[in-house]
C-alpha cells in the first residue's frame, strides 16, 4: 500500500483506521489493563489453530444494502489445541451462520459481539469443514472508507490492514493465505463494470436488469489483498508482452468517464514499471490481466490488491492542462510502488503486521530506484532525502519514535508511518550500498526464490542478503547479524568525524564516532552497522583523489586510513546519503563551499549547502531570541558568509547544473528539519531569522534571480508536447520549479515591477505556474483578484480544485484565518472527501507564523477539525494530528497550548481507538 496520499506533499504521516481495538485472535496475545487499550506484542506471535484453504464469495450489491455470502474451506492446523473458532467481523448483520450446511444457533453454539464471532470449540469439527455465512453490510453509508464503501457512484473496497472483517467473517491476519473465487452481482445500468482479483472466468445476465461476473485468483493471498470494484467506469488499455516468457498481459486503467483522458500517463508508467522489474530484478507479471482503478474518495495513496490496484484519483489521473507538475512524479512513483508489491508484499507476504516494513520499506526502496532511473534527475534522490530528514527525523525525536519494526501496537494501522515506510526504505537501500548492485541482486533473488508463495519476516530478508555478503567477502563466516539492529532500534544515529593528515607519510585518517540518543522505550542504544560512502577532494583543484569507497562502521568508533594521499584532502561524506543519520562533518565553511561547488555527488553538495545554512540560522536565531527575551532595541546579527553567496551565484549560473538542484540551494532547509536542532523553539523568532537570511542573500542575488527567471522562460514553458500525455519531460518541470522558486523569493523581496511578472505568470497554460502566481500574490493587494481568477480555472476539475485549495491554505497572509473560513463555507462545505479535507487544512499547518500564532488559535482550529472528522473517518482524523507531533520541540507557552488541545480531544466522548492511541502515545501517556 502506498501511504503517499495527497497530503504527503506536506510530508505527513499516514494511518489506516479501525474504530475498534484489534482482536485477540490476531497474531499475538493481548495484555488487558482496566481502562487501557489492548496491546499486542511481536514476541507473542503464534500461528493460527485453523487453516483457510479456499474462499468463495458472492457479493450482491443493491442500493440500500449489500449481501455477502461466504464459504470458507477450512481445516485444523497442527497448532490447534482445541480452542474456540474465532472470526473477526465488524458491524456485520448476520442472516445465517453454518458449518457443513448445518445452521448454528446464536447463544448456544456461537456468540457475536459486533467485533468477534466465536464458535464454541465443541461445535467445531476436528478435520476439514466448510464454514458459511451470509451477512448484510452498508457501503452506501460507510464514510470511514475501509471495508466496502461508496465513492461517488462507485462501490470499492479497501482491506489493508483490517478492512476485510467489515465485509465478511474471516480470520483477519496476513499469514492466513487462501485462494479466492469471487462472484459480484449488481444493477447493470448503475454498475456496468464489475472487477475483482485474478482472472474473469465468467459473466452473465440476471433478470430484472442485473448482471454478474465471476473471478478466480489462482494465487494464495491474505485477505487484506482482496478487492472488488463496481461502477460506471471507462478505460484506456494496452497490451504488454513480458520479457522472458513472452506472455501477453492486458492492461486496463479505469476512471469516471469525464477523466478518462487523464489516464494516459498512468498507463505509460505501468508499462515502465513492468519493464523495470524485469530488467533490474528479473521479475515478470504472473496474471493475464492487470487493472488499475481511480476513485475520488480514498484514505491513502493506493492499494496493491492482486491484479486489481485501486488508487486515490490524485495518484492516477493527470493532464498538463489540469494538473500540477508534481502529479506526474507522484503517479510515476505510486503506480510503480503498487506494481512492485506484486512480488514484495503479494507473492512474498508478511508473517504478521509487525513485519510491515518488509513489504513497505522494501517496496518504497524499489519504487525509489525506479523513479531515479526514469527521471534521471539528481533531484529525485534529493527529494527522498529531504522527506526523510524533515519528517522522519522529527518523528524519531518525538514521543512517537519507534523502530521500523515495532515491538507492540494497539491498532496496527497507527504504524503506517514515515518511519516504517521511509526510514525502512533507507534501511533496505543500505543493503545495496554495502553489497553493490551485482551482489545485491543475488541476495534479492535468493529472497524471492526461497519465500515465493509464503509469508516472511525481516530476518528472512536479512538472511538472503547475508548469503550475498558472504559471496562478496568470499568469507563464509561473514555475517549481517548486527545489521538487524536497524529493524529493532529506534532513533536517528549521529555520526561525527575528526581528521588527521600526515604529510610526511602522505596518510590521511578519518576518525568516526556514532551515537544514538536513548529514549523512554530504549534506555540503551547499541552501535549499528553504518555504511559510509566517501570520496576525497583535492582542495587545490576540486578533483577526486580516490575512487569512491564504502567504509563499514560497525563499532561505536573507528579510524579509517587512506594511503598515498598527496595533499590534505576535503572528505566527501555519506555520498548518495548512504545511511539515514545526522552527519556532523566538522568541516569549515570554506571546505563546505568547495564541496558545494565541485563535488561530483549531488547529496554531498546539497548537504554542504544545508550545513552552511544551518550554521547561519542557529547563530542568528540565538541573537534574535536573546534580543526578544532581554527586550533589546538594537543587537548585532551575523551576516551571511559572502563566499557562500558567491557559491550560490556560481552554481545558479552553471549551465551544467540541474535546475531542480538549483531550487534546493536557493532555499533554506525545511522548518521541520531546522526544528531538530533547536530546543524550546520560538516559531516567531525562527520566522524572523529566516527572513533576515533570505534578505541578506537576496540583496546580493535578486538581480541574478530575476535574470535567471526570465532566461528560463522559453524552455520551461515550451508547449511542444503540451497535448501529448505520454511525453513527460522532468528536466523541463525542474526548470519550472526553479522559476517558481525564484518568483517566490523575488515576490517576498518586493523586487521592482515583480507584480507585473506575477500577473503575466498567471496567464501560463501550466497550472504549476498560475497557482504559483496566486501563492506569491499573497504579498500584494492583487491577491483576491488572482484568487477569483484561479478558482474559475480550477473549479470544474476536482483534483485541480484540491491543488487550488492547498495553494490558498498555505498563503502567507495575516488574514489566513478569514480565508480558511471562506474556503470552509464556500468550497469545502460538508465534504467528507479526504483529499478535500487534507487540502484545506494541512498546508496551513506548515505556516510557521500563522499556525503557531501565540494565541493558540491555529492549534484550536485543527483540533476542532480533527474531532469533527473523527466522527466519520478516524483514519483521516489521525492524519490531521501530524502537525502536533512537534509539540515537545516548541517553547513552553506553545507546548502548553498544544497539549491542552490534545487533552481536550482525548476527553471527547466516543473518540476512536486509533485517534486515542495516537494522542496517548504523542503525549507520553501510553
Image (cartoon, rainbow, N blue to C red):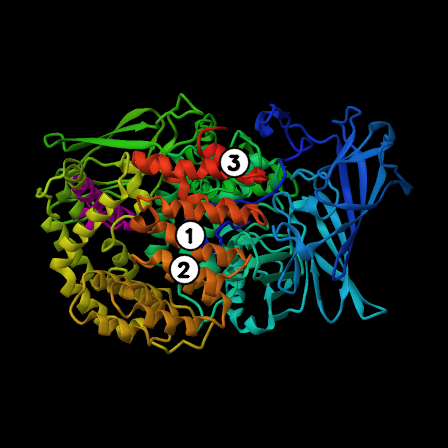
**Element type at mark 3:** loop
Residue 907's tag is: 3
Q: Calculate the distance from the C-alpha at mark 2 to the C-alpha at mark 1.
A: 8 Å
Residue 33 horizontal/vertical position (percent): 60, 23
Where does the magenta region start and end?
594-621
Would residue 443 be found to the left or right of residue 56 on screen? left
Would residue 648 be found to the left or right of residue 846 on screen? left
- Furthest toward the top, the residue is 524
Q: Quadrant of residue 707?
A: bottom left
**Relative to residue 643, is residue 746 depicted above or below?**
below
Residue 403 horizontal/vertical position (percent): 46, 33
The residue indicated by pointer 1 is 842
Q: Calculate the distance from the C-alpha at mark 1 to the C-alpha at mark 3.
A: 23 Å
User: Which residue is found at the position 50% from the left and 40% from the top?
Assistant: 443
Classified by dominant secondary structure, the portion drawn in magenta counts as helix
Residue 474's tag is: none
Would residue 500 be found to the left or right of residue 395 on screen? left
2 and 1 marks in contact (CB < 8 Å): yes
1 and 3 marks in contact (CB < 8 Å): no
Report crowding for label 1: few under 14, some 14 to 19, many 20 or more residues within 10 A (C-alpha): many
Report crowding for label 2: few under 14, some 14 to 19, many 20 or more residues within 10 A (C-alpha): many
The residue indicated by pointer 2 is 806
Amino acid at each position: 500500500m502506498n501511504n503517499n496520499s495527497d497530503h504527503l506533499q506536506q510530508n505527513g504521516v499516514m494511518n489506516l483506521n479501525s474504530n475498534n481495538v484489534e482482536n485477540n485472535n490476531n497474531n499475538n496475545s493481548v495484555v488487558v489493563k482496566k481502562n487501557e487499550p489492548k496491546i499486542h506484542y511481536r514476541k507473542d506471535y503464534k500461528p493460527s489453530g485453523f487453516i483457510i484453504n479456499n474462499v468463495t464469495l458472492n457479493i450482491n450489491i443493491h442500493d440500500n444494502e449489500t449481501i455477502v455470502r461466504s464459504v470458507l474451506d477450512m481445516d485444523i492446523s497442527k497448532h490447534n489445541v482445541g480452542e474456540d473458532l474465532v472470526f473477526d467481523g465488524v458491524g456485520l448483520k448476520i442472516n445465517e451462520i453454518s458449518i457443513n450446511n448445518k445452521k448454528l444457533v446464536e447463544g448456544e453454539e456461537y456468540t457475536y459481539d459486533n467485533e468477534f464471532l466465536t464458535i464454541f470449540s465443541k461445535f467445531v469439527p476436528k478435520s476439514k469443514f466448510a464454514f458459511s455465512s451470509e451477512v448484510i453490510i452498508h457501503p452506501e453509508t460507510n464514510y470511514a472508507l475501509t471495508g466496502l464503501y461508496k465513492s461517488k457512484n462507485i462501490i470499492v473496497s479497501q482491506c489493508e490492514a483490517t478492512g476485510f472483517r467489515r465485509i465478511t467473517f474471516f480470520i483477519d491476519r496476513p499469514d492466513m493465505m487462501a485462494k479466492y473465487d469471487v462472484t459480484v452481482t449488481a444493477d447493470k445500468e448503475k454498475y456496468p463494470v464489475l472487477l475483482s482479483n485474478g482472472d474473469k472466468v465468467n459473466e452473465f445476465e440476471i433478470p430484472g436488469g442485473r448482471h454478474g461476473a465471476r473471478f478466480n485468483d489462482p494465487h494464495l493471498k491474505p485477505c487484506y489483498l482482496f478487492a472488488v470494484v463496481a461502477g460506471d467506469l471507462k478505460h484506456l488499455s494496452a497490451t504488454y508482452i513480458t520479457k522472458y516468457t513472452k506472455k501477453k498481459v492486458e492492461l486496463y486503467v479505469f476512471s469516471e468517464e469525464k477523466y478518462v483522458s487523464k489516464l494516459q500517463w498512468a498507463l505509460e508508467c505501468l508499462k515502465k514499471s513492468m519493464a523495470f522489474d524485469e530488467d533490474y530484478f528479473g521479475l515478470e507479471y504472473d496474471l493475464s490481466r492487470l487493472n488499475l482503478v481511480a476513485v475520488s474518495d480514498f484514505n491513502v495513496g493506493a492499494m496493491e490488491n492482486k491484479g486489481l490496484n485501486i488508487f486515490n484519483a490524485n495518484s492516477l489521473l493527470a493532464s498538463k492542462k489540469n494538473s500540477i507538475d508534481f502529479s506526474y512524479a507522484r503517479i510515476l512513483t505510486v503506480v510503480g510502488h503498487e506494481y512492485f508489491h506484486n512480488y514484495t508484499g503479494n507473492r512474498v507476504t508478511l508473517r504478521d503486521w509487525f513485519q510491515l516494513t518488509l513489504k513497505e520499506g522494501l517496496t518504497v526502496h524499489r519504487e525509489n530506484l525506479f523513479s531515479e532511473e526514469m527521471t534521471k534527475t539528481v533531484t529525485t534522490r534529493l527529494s527522498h532525502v529531504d522527506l526523510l530528514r524533515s519528517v522522519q527525523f522529527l518523528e524519531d525525536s518525538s514521543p512517537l519514535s519507534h523502530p521500523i519494526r515495532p515491538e507492540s501496537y494497539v491498532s496496527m494501522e497507527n504504524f503506517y508511518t514515515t518511519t516504517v515506510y521511509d526510514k525502512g526504505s533507507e534501511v533496505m537501500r543500505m543493503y545495496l550500498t554495502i553489497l553493490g548492485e551485482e551482489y545485491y541482486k543475488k541476495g534479492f533473488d535468493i529472497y524471492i526464490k526461497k519465500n515465493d508463495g509464503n509469508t516472511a519476516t525481516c530476518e528472512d530478508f536479512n538472511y538472503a542478503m547475508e548469503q550475498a555478503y558472504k559471496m562478496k567477502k568470499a568469507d563464509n563466516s561473514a555475517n549481517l547479524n548486527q545489521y538487524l539492529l536497524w529493524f529493532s532500534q529506534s532513533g536517528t544515529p549521529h555520526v561525527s568525524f575528526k581528521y588527521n593528515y600526515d604529510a610526511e607519510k602522505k596518510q590521511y585518517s578519518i576518525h568516526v564516532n556514532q551515537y544514538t540518543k536513548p529514549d523512554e522505550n530504549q534506555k540503551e542504544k547499541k552501535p549499528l552497522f553504518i555504511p559510509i560512502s566517501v570520496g576525497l577532494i583535492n582542495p587545490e583543484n576540486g578533483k577526486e583523489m580516490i575512487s569512491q569507497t564504502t567504509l563499514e562502521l560497525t563499532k561505536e568508533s573507528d579510524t579509517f586510513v587512506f594511503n598515498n594521499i598527496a595533499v590534505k584532502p576535503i572528505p566527501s561524506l555519506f555520498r548518495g546519503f548512504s545511511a539515514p543519520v545526522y552527519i556532523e562533518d566538522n568541516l569549515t565553511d570554506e571546505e563546505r563551499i568547495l564541496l558545494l561547488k565541485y563535488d561530483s555527488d549531488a547529496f554531498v553538495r546539497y548537504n554542504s549547502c544545508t550545513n552552511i545554512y544551518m550554521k547561519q540560522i542557529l547563530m542568528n536565531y540565538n541573537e534574535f531570541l536573546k534580543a526578544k527575551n532581554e527586550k533589546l532595541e538594537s543587537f548585532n546579527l551575523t551576516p551571511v558568509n559572502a563566499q557562500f553567496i558567491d557559491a550560490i551565484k556560481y552554481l545558479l549560473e552553471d549551465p551544467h547544473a540541474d535546475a531542480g538542484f538549483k531550487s534546493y540551494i536557493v532555499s533554506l532547509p525545511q522548518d521541520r528539519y531546522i526544528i531538530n536542532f533547536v530546543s524550546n523553539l520560538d516559531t516567531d523568532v525562527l520566522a524572523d531569522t529566516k527572513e533576515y537570511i533570505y534578505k541578506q542573500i537576496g540583496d546580493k542575488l535578486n538581480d541574478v534571480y530575476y535574470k535567471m527567471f526570465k532566461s528560463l522562460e522559453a524552455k520551461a514553458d515550451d508547449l511542444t508536447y503540451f497535448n501529448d500525455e505520454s511525453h513527460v519531460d522532468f528536466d523541463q518541470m525542474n526548470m519550472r520549479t526553479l522559476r517558481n522558486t525564484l518568483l517566490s523569493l523575488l515576490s517576498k523581496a518586493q523586487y521592482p515591477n515583480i507584480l507585473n511578472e506575477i500577473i503575466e505568470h498567471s496567464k501560463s497554460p501550466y497550472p504549476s505556474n498560475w497557482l504559483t502566481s496566486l501563492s506569491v500574490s499573497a504579498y500584494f493587494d492583487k491577491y483576491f483578484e488572482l484568487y477569483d481568477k484561479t478558482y474559475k480555472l480550477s473549479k470544474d476539475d476536482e483534483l485541480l480544485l484540491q491543488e487550488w485549495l492547498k495553494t490558498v491554505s498555505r498563503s502567507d497572509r495575516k488574514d489566513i484565518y478569514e480565508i480558511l473560513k471562506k474556503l470552509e463555507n464556500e468550497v469545502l462545505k460538508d465534504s467528507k472527501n479526504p483529499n478535500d479535507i487534507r487540502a484545506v487544512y494541512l498546508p496551513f499547518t506548515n505556516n510557521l507564523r500563522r499556525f503557531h500564532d501565540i494565541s493558540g488559535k491555529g492549534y484550536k482550529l485543527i483540533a476542532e477539525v480533527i474531532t469533527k472528522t473523527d466522527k466519520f473517518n478516524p483514519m483521516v482524523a489521525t492524519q490531521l494530528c501530524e502537525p502536533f507531533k512537534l509539540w515537545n520541540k516548541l517553547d513552553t507557552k506553545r507546548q502548553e497550548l498544544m497539549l491542552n488541545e490534545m487533552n481536550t480531544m482525548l476527553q471527547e466522548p466516543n473518540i476512536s481507538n486509533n485517534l486515542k492511541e495516537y494522542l496517548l502515545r504523542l503525549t507520553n501517556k501510553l
